[in-house]
Amino acid sequence: MNEVGECLVAFLFGAIVGLVVQRSRFCNTAALRDAILFKSFRNTKALLVAMMILTIGFTGFISIGEGRTMKFDVGINQVIGLFLFGIGMVLAGACTVSTWVKAGEGNVGAVWALIFTFIGMFLFSLFWSVSYWPPAPASMTGVVDLSALQFGFANAETLQEKLGIPAIFFGLAQTLILAGIYSLILRRERLEKVNAAES
Amino acid sequence: MVTSEFFSKTLDPVIALAAIAVLDIFLFLIVGAWTVGGGETMMTGLIAQFFIGDELNRLPFWNLVFRPDAGYWKIYISLGMISGALVGSILSKEFYIRYPRRLSEWILITIGGLLMGVGIRLAFVCNVSTFFGLTPQMNLGGYLSITGIVAGAWLGSQIYRRVLEL
């Protein structure tokens, strides 16, 4: 597919996402924050369902050699980066999706958050231009490099290649774990309902 | 009518996310899984280029990691999301200009936005790729990212609670 086609597909996908997220008030920040602060799991359950469908879908297609997986080296920078992101999204009350969706609803605070996300990214580009860390995609090696705190690259595709077992089997195992977390949440909600009815 | 109900009632988030997941599988087959951070970085580069022009080339990041390119598909996911939300909120009469009321909210959003921007670039991934891309592909980076974001959200929640109680 050519560049224009890719951009059109991306826009169409984004537009549907924007519409259904706006109508459902789904928020990734709330999926984590509300579970931690209020023991409320409305968004967490939706997140888990999406992850189960995606795990089966992605690993299923990977098994037959289809799909475009993300390929880049990972390392300690993912843990630190998403740790900072996690603090930031709770403070800002929005993640990358809800900033765009709320901006579309006329929320000036969300536009403000987006502006400062861009500024944060630009500030990081200054830092990177001095440190050259984490490694740029062109200089990634795909193997463990502890001096750069990089663990290389591994996903369902590499598991399939190395072990000779179709990726879908690993995917089903991960889906079972996600389903286990989902059922724990359901059990907790049922218990709360019973407790509320008794008191 | 079904359409009027769609715009008058809140959609069950489980249904919304299941639909997004199915579409994301198609996107994965065509261009790659849903992600937002990469497009935002490209927008940052394009905006910076607009303001400072060739001076941007003095920063190796904008050559070696992200070379500003308006034809980068991930940008259009974000533009699609803001458009879809605009249409949805207008049709459901939920569109109105609203501002954070207190100074403390403005400060929290400013700090939060900066942390999100720095965090995405440091990690090479955002929350969307973490939950809707990497982890379902069983990428090691997804598990590292989830560890980080859960710990960060926990700390952020403790700060948020303190600020609310003040």
Image: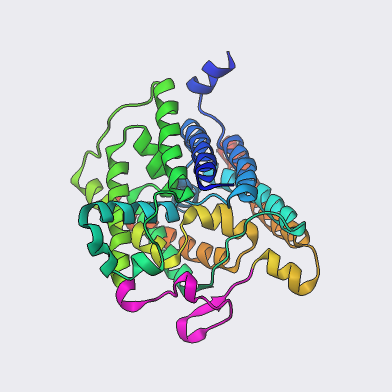
Say if residue A185 shows up in the picture.
no
Quarter placement of the N terminus of chain B:
top right
How many marks the image carries: the answer is 0
Percent across and percent down for residue A197 are 59, 35
Percent across and percent down for residue A91 are 33, 53
Q: Extreme bottom residue here? A: A147
Say if residue B53 shows up in the picture.
yes
Residues B165 and A65: in front is A65
Residues B46 and B123: in front is B46
Q: Residue at x 52, y 83 (%)?
A: A145
Residue A41 vertical position relative to residue A141 in the rendered view, above or below: above
A116 left or right of B137? left
Span shown in magenta: A128-154
Percent across and percent down for residue B136 are 63, 56
Residue A185 vertical position relative to residue A63 in the rendered view, above or below: above
Q: Residue at x 48, y 72 (%)?
A: A138
